[in-house]
Image (cartoon, rainbow, N blue to C red):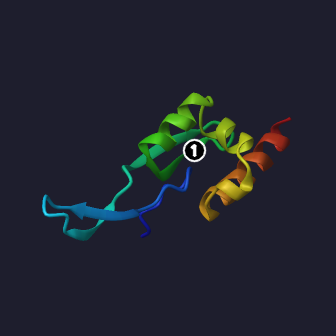
Amino acid sequence: MARRCEVTGKGVQFGHNVSHANNKTLRRFMPNLHGVTLISEALGRNVKLRLSAQGLRSVEHNGGLDNWLVKTADSKLSDDAKKLKRQVKKALTKAA
């Protein structure tokens, strides 16, 4: 499983540990990922996602998973999130 946020796309970054003697060794900066279950009101079910802390704040700031998916461009979403967005849009149009 990739270490990448399914919402924001944040992933692993690379850099150096630098010692006092200025020796550089490669290191990895890991994203702060959490397995989260969010409620989709349009679908009427729970959805499990692997989100970064920033991604979770973004979803909550926009009023929940459904609103966030509808507002976000497809180019910024993962494949699973795009599939979920299509399902949410279909459910919203069916309800209207």
Report the number of numbered marks: 1
- The quadrant holding residue 16 is bottom left
Asked which secondary structure carries label 1, the reply is strand
82 and 93: which one is in front? Answer: 82
14 and 67: which one is in front? Answer: 14
- The quadrant holding residue 76 is bottom right
49 and 8: which one is in front? Answer: 8
Task: State the residue at coordinates (44%, 48%).
Answer: 52
- The quadrant holding residue 82 is bottom right
Quick one: which residue is furthest to the left in this view?
20
Q: Position of residue 63 (x, y in %)?
A: 61, 29
Task: State the residue at coordinates (34%, 63%).
Answer: 15
37 and 5: which one is in front? Answer: 5
Looking at the rendered image, the quarter that the N terminus falls into is: bottom left
The local crowd at label 1, few if under 14, some if 14 to 19, many if 20 or more residues have their Cα within 10 Å, is: few
| Left/right of residue 41 with respect to residue 96 in the rendered view | left
Q: Position of residue 25 (x, y in %)?
A: 23, 70
Q: Position of residue 87 (x, y in %)?
A: 72, 53
Q: Position of residue 78 (x, y in %)?
A: 61, 60
Task: State the residue at coordinates (39%, 54%).
Answer: 31
Is 63 above or below relative to 25? above
Is 65 above or below relative to 6? above
Looking at the rendered image, the quarter that the C terminus falls into is: top right
Give the residue number, with chain letter if any, for mark 1.
Answer: 45
Q: Amino acid at mark 1?
A: Arg
Quick one: which residue is furthest to the front in this view?
21
Task: State the residue at coordinates (51%, 43%).
Answer: 55
| Left/right of residue 66 with respect to residue 54 in the rendered view | right
